[in-house]
């Protein structure tokens, strides 16, 4: 009886990721990797970097996106072959792509990457953006994001008011819940005050040259009614359930995944309230409202001015500014009770949302399916501007 009560108490105090079996929904990999994404094809008008995000035809013709013929991995890169003159307006070509599908609460997203873009002025992100509601009401999860020569990955959530991470001051519970270091607990973000909540990776080799030298690793994100949980494993530590899986394997997250880096239990954040189905986004910007802020730029291992990297040959400055991705796999929990999130036959702006009863074939191929970019304005980069104002670069960078 005592043990039972103790267990009950522990479960209540330290909610763990829900153990679940997941069924594969879709794999982005190999020759078909890029067919599941839309290219942004515009200047960076959200994080204000000095890049032009190319359209698909330019991305393909200039080999800014391609599938490596030897490894079969998807490569997404910054132009490192064009000489950009020192003019009043400086923009270098880069890439931002967004999945045609959105993944609802109940989903699991696993990315296996061998290289994440890094170097002075470089700001890569792998993140998700909720559909159908104006940002940030549908939620945003930043899964891989750091800048310049930082060697540590950071995770952030952006929501409307009322979603929080557990307080890191309750030491014992936080150490059981997650292994990462919580920097900010309040996930609330607005256009004018885009703090968001923030957790720093505590495991080695999560970003930069060290990530690449360790042959990369895997990030897994569980978007569940019970909470949001994110894991990172360097290549040599990837659990067998993942390293031995193929695209059609079911995924059992209870097996050998260990403690997640990030744990956002629903007790502090009603997931179904703050997160709609999420599109996946991959991008690389240069400078902008985080990497390019002079004080942050200088304190993250870089000298001079950010824009001076963008000017000139681009080689060797941007030779490491590329993603190398073995695969991105998405799954849906076997136990999730699904509702039709798209659910609006009169809507012309819906993104196909993958649900178990709708086959993968029905999504993304619809010529009429259009992005809802007009109502979904990601400004995750502004986080840094405001955090800087609030806390100064020392805290943000953890230096
Ligand atoms: C960015 O540009 C696109 C295309 O012109 C536009 O649809 C979008 O609203 C713009 N976003 C912002 C934040 O200005
Ligand atoms: C893609 O971008 C290039 C360069 O801006 C432009 O010339 C071309 O017309 C665009 N292609 C499409 C299909 O929009
Ligand atoms: C770099 O981009 C920012 C944001 O768009 C812009 O304000 C700035 O003028 C750009 N710098 C140059 C040299 O083009
Ligand atoms: C751990 O708890 C102690 C006592 O409550 C507090 O002083 C300390 O700042 C906490 N440490 C962290 C990392 O939260
Ligand atoms: C989180 O931040 C928002 C916006 O600044 C504020 O309104 C809210 O009260 C904060 N929540 C907590 C729990 O501090
Ligand atoms: C995945 O692995 C299973 C079990 O080893 C095998 O039966 C199946 O054919 C594999 N599927 C693919 C797409 O390789
Ligand atoms: C969480 O949000 C959902 C959807 O808005 C709502 O139906 C539910 O009652 C909320 N749960 C709690 C505990 O507030
Ligand atoms: C670009 O021009 C400005 C103004 O003349 C100068 O300060 C800066 O050093 C130049 N940058 C490069 C990379 O040549
Ligand atoms: C661009 O970088 C790649 C390595 O990522 C390198 O192989 C290539 O030679 C570089 N291009 C130029 C023009 O230097
Ligand atoms: C969801 O709703 C859309 C629009 O009404 C419909 O086309 C689609 O078939 C529905 N999907 C499922 C799985 O019911
Ligand atoms: C369905 O789509 C129409 C047209 O886009 C829109 O006016 C309506 O508000 C949508 N209804 C719901 C429930 O989303």
Image (spheres, rainbow, N blue to C red):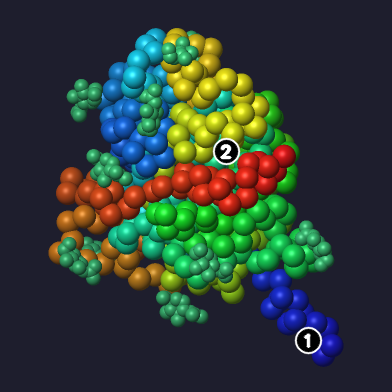
Picture mark count: 2
Q: Where is mark 2, residue-wise?
A: 146
| Point 18% across, 45% down: residue | 367
For the N terminus, the quadrant is bottom right
Residue 376, how many percent across, how many down?
A: 32, 53
| Point 43% across, 71% down: residue | 273
Q: Secondary structure at mark 1?
A: helix
Q: Residues within 10 Å of mark 2 (few under 14, many from 20)?
A: many
Would you say residue 367 is visible in this rendering? yes
Q: Where is mark 1, residue-wise?
A: 5
Which mark is in front, 2 or 1? Answer: 2
In the displayed structure image, the side of residue 89 where residue 71 appears, left or right:
right
In the drawing, what numbered circle is on residue 17?
Answer: none
CB atoms at circles 2 and 1 under 8 Å apart? no
Q: Secondary structure at mark 2?
A: loop
Residue 295, how many percent across, how many down?
A: 59, 34
In the displayed structure image, the side of residue 233 where residue 304 appears, left or right:
left
Would you say residue 22 is visible in this rendering? no
| Point 40% across, 54% down: residue | 191
**Mark earlier in primary sequence (2, 1):** 1
């Amino acid at each position: 009886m005592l043990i039972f009560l103790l267990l009950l108490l522990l479960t209540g105090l330290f909610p763990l990721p829900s153990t679940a079996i997941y069924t594969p929904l879709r794999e982005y990999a190999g020759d078909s990797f890029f067919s599941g994404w839309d290219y942004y094809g515009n200047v960076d008008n959200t994080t204000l970097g000095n890049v032009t995000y190319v359209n698909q035809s330019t991305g393909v013709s200039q080999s800014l996106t391609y599938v490596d013929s030897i490894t079969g991995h998807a490569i997404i890169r910054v132009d490192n072959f064009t000489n950009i003159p020192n003019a009043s307006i400086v923009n270098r070509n880069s890439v931002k792509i967004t999945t045609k599908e959105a993944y609802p609460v109940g989903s699991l997203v696993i990315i296996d990457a061998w290289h994440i873009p890094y170097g002075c002025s470089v700001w890569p992100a792998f993140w998700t953006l909720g559909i159908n509601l104006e940002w940030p009401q549908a939620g945003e999860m930043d899964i891989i994001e750091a800048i310049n020569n930082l060697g540590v990955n950071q995770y952030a959530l952006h929501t409307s008011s009322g979603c929080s991470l557990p307080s890191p001051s309750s030491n014992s519970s936080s150490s059981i819940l997650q292994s990462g270091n919580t920097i900010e607990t309040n996930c609330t973000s607005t256009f004018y005050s885009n703090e968001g909540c923030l957790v720093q990776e505590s495991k080695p080799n999560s970003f930069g040259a060290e990530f690449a030298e360790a042959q990369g690793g895997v990030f897994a994100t569980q978007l569940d009614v019970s909470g949001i949980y994110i894991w990172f494993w360097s290549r040599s530590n990837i659990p067998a359930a993942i390293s031995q899986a193929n695209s059609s394997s079911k995924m059992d997250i209870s097996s050998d995944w260990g403690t997640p880096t990030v744990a956002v239990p629903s007790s502090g954040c009603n997931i179904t309230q703050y997160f709609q189905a999420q599109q996946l986004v991959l991008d690389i910007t240069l400078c902008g409202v985080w990497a390019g802020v002079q004080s942050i730029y200088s304190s993250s291992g870089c000298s001079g001015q950010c824009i001076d990297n963008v000017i000139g040959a681009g080689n060797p400055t941007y030779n490491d500014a590329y993603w190398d991705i073995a695969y991105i796999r998405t799954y849906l929990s076997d136990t999730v009770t699904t509702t039709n999130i798209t659910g609006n036959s009169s809507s012309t702006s819906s993104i196909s949302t993958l649900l178990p009863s709708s086959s993968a074939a029905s999504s993304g191929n619809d010529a009429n399916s259009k992005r809802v970019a007009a109502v979904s304005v990601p400004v995750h980069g502004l986080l840094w501007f405001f955090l800087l104002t609030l806390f100064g670069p020392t805290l943000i960078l953890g230096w």
